[in-house]
Image: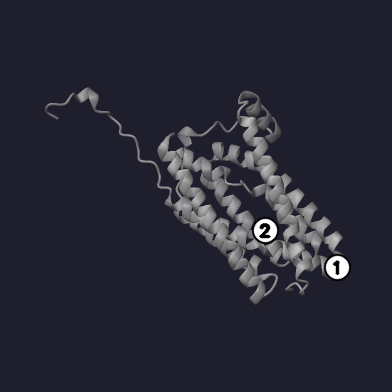
Amino acid sequence: MEGKDPLATPLLRRSKPPPLAPLYAVSLLRTTATAIAMMPAFNLRVVSLGEAAGYDTAAVANAMGLISAFRSFTEFTAAPLLASWSDRLGRRRVILASALAFTMEATLMAVSTGLVMLGAVHATFGCFASGGAVETSCIADATPAGPKRAVAVGRFFTVIGAALVLGPALGGALLARVGGAAPFACAACLGLTAFLATAVALPEYLPPSRRAPKESTTMLPAAGVYRLLSQTPPLRWYVAASGLFSLGMSLYGTVNVLWLKEADPKPVVE
């Protein structure tokens, strides 16, 4: 080491962060599976089961709205808790549990024979949906704050966008050509593939040395949101705009299938 100061050389080099490619691949599988099961297959399944039970259009619309509301509530409650648990238990474990839960949800929806069972399954398993919170935490763990993290997050949302294009197309094709349970069966297979890929290929992005203490408390979602907004006033406008956008998208997602059915009243595929 001639010409160099030995003290200027670190004794321990910083370990290279895990690659993000496995996370992108798993997210593509999971999001594609979710999109296959949800758009438009889920809404059409609700319509089909409602009509089979003798409900009119208004009753079906009411059932669809209630199911969506309960699902949104469970996701709103669970997403911060899942992210908090991943801070203590590790990202990989939570992603594994979420993938397995989605596989079970899609399987049960494929065999559901009534609105009550379908709605109960869909709402209950929302408790295991992180809404991307754990995945974005993985990106934060693996990249430094700044341009590199922004690029990584942009790539992640590009993957999500591609899945949201591919999923509905596959779900609609399966629904038209095979039957009402086919999209959910396909989603379950993709969910199982994502689970296996996570178990085999996904690294742990949060090592034990950086995890939160297991005895630390978990803040309730509403309390956490209130605290964050009270400490960051400019964020309130962003949250308000995002809330209105989500409200509009939820309303559209609830009624679009019913409107299309009224415009083109052909039998819903069983």
Residue 246 is marked as none
Q: Mark 2: few, some, or many residues within 10 Å (few <14, many ≥20)? A: many
Q: Residue at x 23, y 23 (%)?
A: 7
- Is 199 displayed left or right of 7 in the figure? right
Earlier-in-chain disc, 2 versus 1: 1
- Residue behind mark 1: 53
Q: Foreground: 138 or 6?
A: 138
- Residue behind mark 2: 105
Amino acid identity at mark 1: Ala
Q: Residue at x 87, y 65 (%)?
A: 55
Image location of residue 150, percent across then percent down = 45, 40
Amino acid identity at mark 2: Glu
Using the image, determine if residue 224 lies above or below residue 123: above
Image location of residue 103, percent across then percent down = 62, 59
Image location of residue 220, percent across then percent down = 69, 33
Most extreme residue toward the front, as rendered?
263
Image location of residue 91, percent across then percent down = 52, 43
Q: Quadrant of the N terminus?
A: top left
